[in-house]
Amino acid sequence: MGVPHFDVTFDIDGNGVLNVTAEDKDTGRKNNIIISNRSGRLNKEEIERMALEAERYKMKRIKQLQIEAVQGN
């Protein structure tokens, strides 16, 4: 058994609708969810914070993959 590899994409449109897509890189299976901006949901600041965190995680993961490639993992 190996380590699962997923690509996850977050997209927020101008109306605050969040579209999240995940793809299993080993099997090619994809799934997505759309989260609309209704009352009781995340506000604009919370969405922006989450998008920033996702971008930070993405950059951290890219660096990790580069290190693993250099190390031959």
Image (spheres, grey):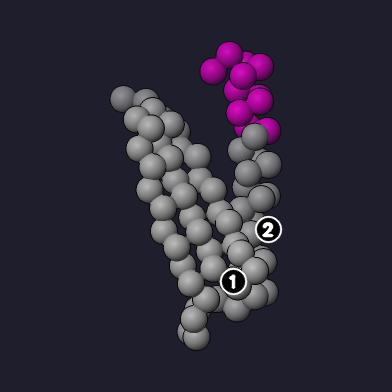
> How much space separates mark 1 and mark 2, taking CA atoms?
15 Å
73 relative to 63, above or below: above
Query: Which quarter of the figure is the C terminus placed in?
Result: top right
Query: Which quarter of the figure is the N terminus placed in?
Result: top left
Residue holding disc 1: 16
In the image, residue 44 lies in the stretch drawn in magenta: no
Place residue 51 in its image quadrant: bottom right
In the image, residue 71 lies in the stretch drawn in magenta: yes
Residue at x 65% of width, y 69% of height: 14
| Residue found at the very far top of the displayed protein | 72
Crowding near pointer 1: few (<14 within 10 Å), some, many (20+)? some
Whether residue 46 appears in this view of the structure is no
Name the spot of residue 26 as percent of width and height, x first. 38, 28
- Identify the magenta region: 63-73
Name the spot of residue 29 as percent of width and height, x first. 35, 37
Tell me which numbered mark, 1 or 2, is placed earlier along the sequence. 1
Q: From the image, give the main secondary structure of the stretch colored magenta.
A: helix
Q: Which amino acid type corresponds to the residue marked 1 in the rendered image?
A: Gly
Residue holding disc 2: 52
